[in-house]
Amino acid sequence: MTTKKYPLELELPWVEKYRPKYLDEVVGNVETINALKRISKDGNLPHLILSGSPGIGKTTTILCLARELFNNDEKLLKEGILELNASDDRGIEIVRNLIKNFSQKKVLLPYNRHKIIILDEADSITSSAQQALRRTMEIYSNSTRFIFSCNQSNKIIEPLQSRCSILRFNKLKDEEILIILKRILKNEGIESFTNDGLSSIIFTSDGDLRQAINNLQSVYYGFKLINSENVFKIVDLPNPLIVNRMIKECLNGEIDKGLTILKELWNKGYSAIDIINVCFKVCKTINSDDNIDNEKQLKILRNIGECQMRVVEGVSSFLQLSSMLVSLCDV
């Protein structure tokens, strides 16, 4: 019996299959991308720190920049780039051996180009290793450039920050994520989706494009239909429509109805932090159509934020969430 073989591309997850290869293909953070385009055109790459939330394109942007700097030459991309990510051991020995050896290596590059060392998740590098990098960056600055990618730039020591240009990435806007999702669906020839399904994927991703694409693929392969109900089954979060109804019942003074909905969510196994996070997202979208002005909205968000703080500190009980609903009744 022979097994049918498929092309390798079909086996790639969508997040890799549709990963941008050039800076023009990167969506969002327009000002930051334009700054990198100028760097790729001039060729004078400084040491860089790219900071921002996960899944918004930091590592992809670095690889796009390197591809353009090396004129899409696969040999140069292989020889002229050293990439270390969070799965690698990045203690002081790695700095003294691997990074130093790569910095000393001779590579024939185009004029005004440098070897690139990419340190992904740089905020998890040990403090001693960061201290050791200071001297290495200075000694080999004529031939090698360092690019740090991190979630929080303040976890990188100040001596390294002072040697680098810091570029900050923001979360992607909903409309930017929607453009990418529709482009993927069109390329895959998928028509079995609803607008509320795409809206639900964007809502649960919270600006994280990687998570949005992964959820899109999971929902499609799991149910062959991308709608709101199937999305929340996959991501395992409380449905925001139900949470919205619960909050409105409390704002109308119907605390018993609100507590009944909360009890149903609790019995389904949703954790306190999941419920409180969805409450926070839902309340940020409340507008004047719900007869709630800005002052009331701020009071609602403050009450939810106080409850969220207690839940994060460890008091994740049903009683804590009930107390939050009672405080919403007072609003």
Image (cartoon, rainbow, N blue to C red):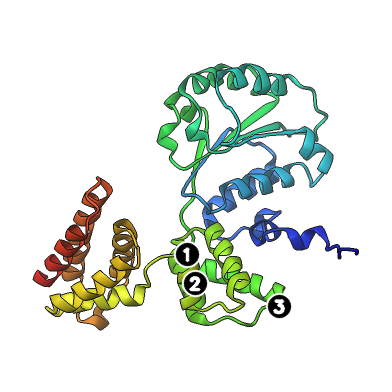
Amino acid of disc 1: Val
Q: Earlier in the sequence, mark 3 or mark 2?
A: 3
Taking 72 as reference, is 175 above or below it? below
Q: Residue at x 35, y 72 (%)?
A: 240
- Picture coordinates of residue 153, whole percent (x, y): 44, 37
Q: Mark 2 points at which residue?
A: 231
Q: Residue at x 18, y 58 (%)?
A: 320
Q: Residue at x 68, y 42 (%)?
A: 42
Gap in angstroms between the C-alphas marked 3 and 1: 23 Å
Gap in angstroms between the C-alphas marked 3 and 2: 19 Å
CB-based contact (under 8 Å), mark 2 and mark 1: yes
Amino acid of disc 3: Gly
Image quadrant in which you'd find residue 203: bottom left
Q: Which of 80 and 97 is in front in this view?
A: 97
Relative placement, left or right, of 289 versus 240 is: left
Per the image, label 1 sits on a secondary structure element best described as helix
- Say which mark, if any, is on residue 113: none
Gap in angstroms between the C-alphas marked 2 and 1: 6 Å
- Say which mark, if any, is on residue 189: 3
CB-based contact (under 8 Å), mark 3 and mark 1: no
- Dot 2 crowding, Cα within 10 Å, few <14, some 14–19, many 20+: many
Q: Mark 1 points at which residue?
A: 235
Taking 282 as reference, is 315 above or below it? above
